[in-house]
Image (spheres, rainbow, N blue to C red):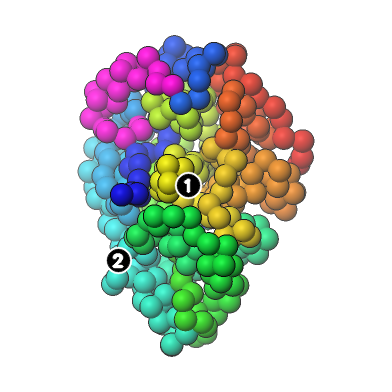
Amino acid sequence: MPEQYAEESLGHIMLSEAEYPDKHFRTRTGAPRVAQHDNRGFFSSLLGRAGLGGGLFRTAELPSRSFRSMGTMAAVTLGGDYAGRIEEVTEEIRAIFDRLESEMSAYRPSSVISELSRMAGVAPVRVPEDTYRVLSLGQHFGNLTAGAFNIGASPLAALWGFNGAAVPMTLPSDQSVGELLELSDYSRLVFNDGAAFLPAKGMAVDVGGIAKGYAVDRAYDYCLSAGIRDFLIDFSGNVRAAGRPSRKQGWQIGVRDPFDGSSILGKITLPSRSAVSTSGSYERFVDILGERYSHIIDPRTGYPVTGTASVTVLCPDAVTADALSTAFFVTGLNGAAELLEKVSSVDLLLVPDGYPTHLWLTPGFDKVLSTPTEVRRSLLSCQ
Ligand code: AMP
Ligand code: MG
């Protein structure tokens, strides 16, 4: 039976300079793309020591807590000066994430988003403020990315076996893809007086490509309002940080190697008050007739995206990083320069699917990413 797979790990790996020397990078020279790597055991033991099964390694000395929300893992880490407040802050952030999940999950029949899809072609649905803002932002990023980011692509995602739908035993026909392309149009979502409406039966929305980033921004606002100045929030690869973990160093995170979940491609030293989001083909995929299909749909063709392994976006806020990492995943390397010209304060790291691993990055990303010397990196010529 084909199955849907979901990796439930944190997308980034937080690093401690002291405990995380360069030898943890994987050397890929000469290694086939799908090979298992001998540093897996060592890395896993580090994860084990941190008490997490996911992708996050936290420093022993910093107060940090992780929890599940939106079907994945989240983690909150505070600077040492705030150690006494870690439980209170984590509980507050968990409550924010859970509340947003109950409004926006496409997997919960009781959510407003599910109701909106159920009532497509029937009647408008009253939406609470956060859902309204996420839907509006979804439309904004749809327009900005010429439809590469499309919160209306849910019918297509379901055709390919995502969003809780059964995974097809054979490839969907061109005809069925074509029919759903018309229904998968975010721009037809209408708002009126606090209500939203999908005008045709069969339309559906999925805010899975933006909701976690939005949630991280809400958690960030809460932390600042609660007087916390040094913190890092990681919600399944959507990170936003403020301040610094200690007087000696800034926040550092590892970008996961899309070809080997137990390794990192490199280390990002986060500029102050910045957000990072990674979209990866490894996160969630289906297997149809022995081929893997990624969870991100190219709304222009109706097919799951091929050719991109991972995209990391660095910019000032988490919701932009989240939406644009999904969008750049769709545009791939070929369409990246065109989209980069339309956005400001956005830096990009894009890893095409292929061997040997080749990192493409904007000059701003180049400044903050360190990789082992043998890693091939090229500048994206734009901005
Ligand atoms: P992310 O991990 O942030 O890149 O988001 C991926 C999720 O966004 C998928 O699991 C779907 O729920 C949704 N999604 C898939 N394709 C698209 C797309 N082209 N535009 C917007 N959201 C999408
Ligand atoms: Mg996203």
**Is 43 included in the stretch rendered in magenta?**
yes
- Front-lying residue, 125 or 200: 200
Q: Is residue 233 visible?
A: no
The residue that disc 1 covers is 293
Neighbor class of circle 1 (other Cα within 10 Å; few <14, some 14-19, many 20+) is: many
The residue that disc 2 covers is 108
Residue at x-position 48% and y-position 55%: 171
Residue 187 in picture, x, y percent from top left: 60, 72
Give the residues drawn in magenta, as a range: 35-56
Quadrant location, the C terminus: top right
Residue 213 in picture, x, y percent from top left: 46, 52
Q: Label 2 sits on what residue type?
A: Arg
Residue 336 in picture, x, y percent from top left: 69, 45
**Is 4 included in the stretch rendered in magenta?**
no
Above-or-below relation of 102 to 272: below
Mark 1 and mark 2 lie on one chain; the one further toward the N terminus is 2
Q: Secondary structure at mark 1?
A: strand
On residue 69, which mark appears? none
Q: Secondary structure at mark 2?
A: loop
Could you tell whether 284 is left or right of 152 in the image?
A: left
Neighbor class of circle 2 (other Cα within 10 Å; few <14, some 14-19, many 20+) is: some
Above-or-below relation of 376 to 119: above
Could you tell whether 366 is left or right of 234 in the image?
A: right
Circles 1, 2 touching at the beta carbon (< 8 Å): no
- Front-lying residue, 138 or 96: 138
Which quadrant would residue 290 be assigned to in this image? top left
Residue 128 in picture, x, y percent from top left: 39, 74
